[in-house]
Image (cartoon, rainbow, N blue to C red):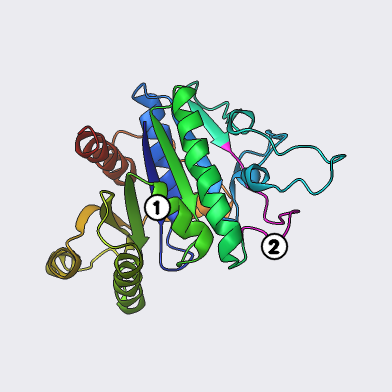
Amino acid sequence: MKTIILHSYKGGTGKTTIALNIAISFAKKGYKTLAIDADLNAPTFESIFTGLKPKYKFNDLFGVQKKKTELKPPTPKDLPVKSLIHENLDLIFANSKPQFGVGLLSMNKNFHSEALKKLYHAKQEFEKLGYDYVIIDTSPSLNLASINSIIIADASLIVLRPNKYGIAGTTFLLKELYSMLGTVKRKDYIVFNQIVVGTPAKLVTQWQKHFKKRLGVETVGTIHCNCAIALNMLFGNLIIEDDAENEFLETIDKIVMKLHRDLKN
């Protein structure tokens, strides 16, 4: 089993849309896939999959039983629910209002140290359940909750909107990440999203060289602005329908095939 996280320096980069469509692409290729909404600042699965009402959510995995009369936290196998959009795709929702202790949105190091242990255990349990890929949509920026997801990942896709702030912010994020975690076996990639139509190809190449030369991070996808997708997002539809000539889905497919090849070993 391989775990892939989608992360960004700030919100609004489109990482959730990319995460969901990558998960769907893996599922359609025959891989049992689990997509996890771990963006506790702005969870979105609940608003997208309105017909699903999961009993447990991602936050519940880290609950603390304070009294004997309280229900014990669920086990990892209790969290996934069927997506109803593909038989190979399951989902785990998030609750933006944690009901336990200091919560996953805090910077309490002791809490997150224990949370990391539980996350490693969950990863092992998900593998026992037969998942081939786990796709995690994290909260943006570097906080202890997102760092835990990054630590357990086999690969990360850093999504950014290519502008002055996106380039500078993502460069800072990667430098800080490597400073904190050092050299790890995780494979990191850049995805440029929402590139304005008409942007010179030479400029896009310069951005790619910037991350490759300065940080050793390869660009795995470049996605241009698409009005139809933006309109779908306006109405909360982040799942892009199949279309043979859809540039977005073509890029998603290339990313999925690239990840599959690179993570085989």
In the image: residue 226, left or right of residue 114:
left
In the image: residue 110, left or right of residue 204:
right
Q: Residue tagged by mark 2?
A: 102
What span is in magenta?
A: 92-104
Q: Mark 2 is on which residue type?
A: Val
Residue 100 included in the magenta stretch of the image: yes
Q: Earlier in the sequence, mark 1 or mark 2?
A: 2
Q: Percent x, y for residue 132?
A: 38, 27
Q: Residue tagged by mark 1?
A: 151
In the image: residue 175, left or right of residue 202:
right
Q: Mark 1 is on which residue type?
A: Ile
Q: Quadrant of residue 70?
A: top right
* 81 shown above or below 155: above
Q: Nearer the viewer, residue 113 or 187?
A: 113
Residue at image coords 53%, 30%: 90
Any part of residue 41 in sight = no
Residue at image coords 20%, 39%: 262
Label 1 and label 2: CA atoms lie apart by 21 Å
